[in-house]
């Protein structure tokens, strides 16, 4: 399902990480897919409030938790730069879909990275 939100459709998720050889591209591709699915889920379910949005962003965050092992297997990790980029992209998604009051820490509350 293609993303219909123009801001989200044009966003180059994890762009900063792709520019750094420390982060393996094949793992970043999986991370980008997580963020794309988050947009698709928001568009499909149209969360009515922040609580409903947080359910979707928490699921995406848990997918990133599972991706940590792949980063490590490739000699990398979700460290400070990656944490900021992932959290920033999830916050961007919330903003793009009209959730200006979303709390960035709550968006990624179940993170283990």
Image: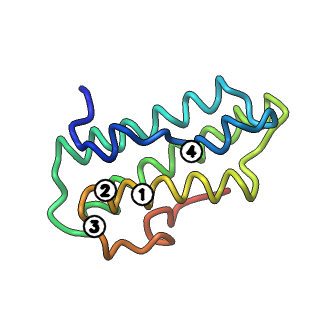
Q: Gap in Å between the C-alphas at discs 3 and 2?
A: 7 Å
Local packing at callout 3 (Cα closer than 10 Å; few below 14, some 14-19, many 20+) is some
Identify the mark nearer the N-term, 2 or 4. Answer: 4
Circle on res. 19: none
Q: Give the image's coloring scheme.
A: rainbow
Label 3: element kind: loop
Q: Gap in Å between the C-alphas at discs 4 and 3?
A: 21 Å
Which quarter of the figure is the C terminus placed in? Answer: bottom right
Residue named by callout 3 = 99
Local packing at callout 1 (Cα closer than 10 Å; few below 14, some 14-19, many 20+) is many
Who's the residue at 49% across and 53% down the image?
Answer: 89
Q: Gap in Å between the C-alphas at discs 2 and 1?
A: 6 Å
Residue named by callout 2 = 96
Q: Closest to the observer: 113 or 33?
A: 33
Residue named by callout 1 = 92
Label 4: element kind: helix
The relative height of residue 22 versus residue 107 in the rendered view (above or below) is above
Local packing at callout 4 (Cα closer than 10 Å; few below 14, some 14-19, many 20+) is many
Q: Gap in Å between the C-alphas at discs 1 and 3?
A: 10 Å
Q: At which x and y percent is residue 103?
A: 42, 74
Residue named by callout 4 = 64
Question: In the rendered structure, are the residues bearing label 2 and label 4 in contact, judged by CB atoms less than 8 Å apart?
Answer: no
Question: In the rendered structure, are the residues bearing label 2 and label 1 in contact, judged by CB atoms less than 8 Å apart?
Answer: yes
Local packing at callout 2 (Cα closer than 10 Å; few below 14, some 14-19, many 20+) is some
Q: At which x and y percent is residue 6?
A: 26, 42
Who's the residue at 80% across and 32% down the image?
Answer: 21
Q: At which x and y percent is residue 79?
A: 76, 53
Which quarter of the figure is the N terminus placed in? Answer: top left
């Amino acid at each position: 399902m293609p993303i219909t939100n123009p801001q989200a459709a044009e966003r180059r998720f994890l762009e900063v990480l792709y520019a750094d050889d420390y982060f393996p591209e094949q793992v970043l591709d999986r991370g980008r897919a997580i963020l794309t699915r988050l947009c698709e889920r928001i568009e499909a379910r149209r969360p009515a409030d922040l609580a409903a949005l947080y359910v979707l962003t928490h699921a995406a965050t848990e997918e990133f938790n599972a991706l940590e092992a792949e980063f490590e297997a490739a000699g990398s990790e979700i460290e400070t730069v990656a944490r900021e980029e992932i959290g920033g992209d999830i916050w961007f998604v919330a903003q793009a879909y009209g959730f200006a009051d979303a709390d960035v820490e709550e968006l990624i509350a179940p993170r283990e990275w």
